[in-house]
Image (cartoon, rainbow, N blue to C red):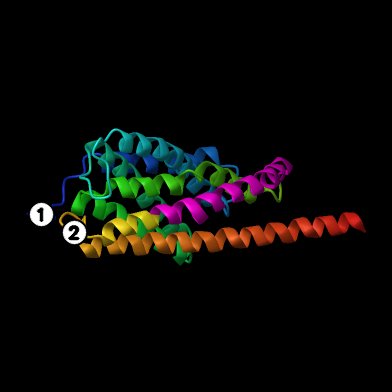
Amino acid sequence: METQAQFQFQSPPTLPLFLSFFVLIYLIAQFLVFRNWSPKIRPEASSCLISFFHGTPAVFLATGAIFADPNRGFASPNTEFQNLVLDYSIAYFLMDLLHYVIFVPGDLLFIGHHLATLFVFVTCRYLVSHGAFAILSLLILAEVTSFCQNTWTLANARRGDVEFAARVYDLLSPPFYALYSVVRGFAGPYFLYQMGLFYLSGAADGVIPRWVWVSWIVVVLTAISVSILWITNLWVELYRVRTGKLEKKAR
């Protein structure tokens, strides 16, 4: 007889600690690291800094948490280590969501993205307590490009007034776009396909209710689709700019 899912919210001992950490990093970024930057781009730069402290560490933490679990699978129960990583990411997205609500309230796309991501993490961590293998694997795929993306974003913000930033932006754009395209255009969809096949088989219905995993699939599929559209537009813009420069040189 299959074990029924237990809907028990657990106390989050590490979540307040991690949230305080990201709040502190954000404040340091605003008032120390980027204090001489324009007020218009300082919030975005501060958001990038907390992302630096989340993205790459989350990749290593999630990888370690996955391989430390001998019973890893799409429906396996979460381990304490996996829950720790989920709390770390929940804290980051809460802080970054607060940033968008305060400084960029009109960016409904990112606000919606963060809310949807938090829904996935919170339901996995505190509602069903299963499926962290799938969610952390997706986290790895999402954040493996984080370092490049944040560096690219900071360079883009200053390339108009800092020559070094312009050179970094021009140099980094093609490899960043290529890596992002491979991860979001191929690796992510393939993993989501495997994840969907498993859940559709009904193998997880005893521990992860259907409405939960269906919502996970919808959220991730939407995020991947938006990411593919975003990177496609960047490739088109890069081609347009590079073509324009070649035409100028040819004249």
The residue at the far right in this view is 251
Real-space CA distance between mark 2 and mark 1, rounded to the nearest whole angstrom: 9 Å
Q: At which x and y percent is residue 36?
A: 60, 42
Q: In the rendering, which numbered label is found on residue 214?
A: none
Residue range of the region highlighted in magenta in the rendering: 162-191
The residue closer to the viewer here, 76 or 220, is: 76
SS type, badge 2: loop
Q: At which x and y percent is residue 8?
A: 13, 52
Task: From the image, tell me which residue sits under label 2.
Answer: 205
In this rendering, the answer to whether 45 lies above or below 232 is: above
- The answer to which quarter of the image holds residue 102 is bottom left
Amino acid found under the numbered disc labelled 1: Glu
The residue closer to the viewer here, 38 or 64, is: 64
Report crowding for label 2: few under 14, some 14 to 19, many 20 or more residues within 10 A (C-alpha).
Answer: some
In this rendering, the answer to whether 17 lies above or below 110 is: above
Report crowding for label 1: few under 14, some 14 to 19, many 20 or more residues within 10 A (C-alpha).
Answer: few
Q: Residue sitting at 50 percent across and 59 percent down? A: 227
Q: Residue sitting at 47 percent across and 58 percent down? A: 103
The residue closer to the viewer here, 235 or 10, is: 235
Q: In which quarter of the image is the C terminus?
A: bottom right
Q: In which quarter of the image is the N terminus?
A: bottom left
Q: In the image, is residue 174 part of the stretch drawn in magenta?
A: yes
Q: Dominant secondary structure of the magenta stretch?
A: helix
Task: From the image, tell me which residue sits under label 1.
Answer: 2
> Between disc 2 and disc 1, whose residue precedes?
1
Asked if labels 1 and 2 touch by Cβ distance under 8 angstroms, the answer is yes
The residue at the far left in this view is 1
Q: At which x and y percent is residue 212?
A: 24, 61
SS type, badge 1: loop
